[in-house]
Image: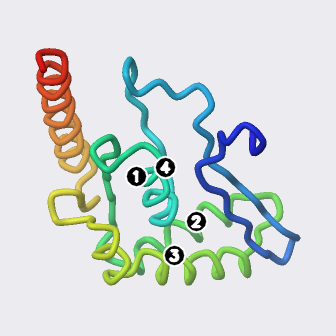
Amino acid sequence: MEAENLIIEARSYHTEHGIWTYFTSSYGIDLENNNYLQINTLEGYQQLKAYFGEDKVVPIYIEVKDDGERLQRALTRERAEKQPKYQELCRRFLADQMDFSEENLAKANIGSHDRFCNENFMTCVQAIEKRINAELDLSKIKKRCLVQS
C-alpha cells in the first residue's frame, strides 16, 4: 500500500509490549458514492483533511467532561481482560490527555459544533445524528451545485 501511495497516515507507539503500529489507508474509499465513519486521533484527522480535502472530512468529537469517569470506564474495561495491563492503560490515558488537549483541538479547528458531550447517551447520539444528517444534506446541495456548474 505504501508503494501505491494508499497510506494516508501511520503511527507507531513504543509500548511495554513492543512497537504497536497502525495506519489509515485510502484503499477502497470512494467519497463520490459513499460515506464513511472512522475513529482516529487528531493527527490522523488532520492527515485525512490534507489527503481528501477539508470539505470532505467532518469531525465528530465525543467527550466525557469528567476525566475521572473516563478513567474509571477504562479501568473497568481493563479489569475484565484476562491479563490486565494497567501500566499501558495509564500511558494511553496520559497520552490522550496531551493529544486531545484544548490547544490541539483548536489547532485542528474542532469547534463547539463539532463536539458532543457524552453525559446522556441518547441525547449525545441524537445530537450526532442531527449533525451527520445536516452534513449529508449539505453535501447533496454541494454535489448538485457541482453538477450544475
> How far, Cα to Cα, is label 4 from label 1?
14 Å
Q: Which of marks 3 and 2 is nearer the N terminus?
A: 2
The residue tagged 3 is 96
Q: Earlier in the sequence, mark 4 or mark 2?
A: 4
Is 94 placed above or below 17 here?
A: below
Assign a secondary structure to mark 2.
helix
Query: Would residue 3 appear left or right of 63 to someone viewing this image?
Result: right
Q: Which amino acid does label 1 sit on?
A: Lys
Q: Residue at x 27, y 65 (%)?
A: 110
Q: Are marks 2 and 1 in contact (CB under 8 Å)?
A: no
Label drawn at residue 76: 2
Q: Residue at x 79, y 75 (%)?
A: 15
> How far, Cα to Cα, is label 2 from label 1?
34 Å
Q: Do the residues labelled 1 and 3 touch (CB within 8 Å)?
A: no
Is 143 placed above or below 85 here?
A: above
The residue tagged 4 is 39
Mark nearest the camera among 4 and 1 is: 1
Q: Which amino acid does label 2 sit on?
A: Thr
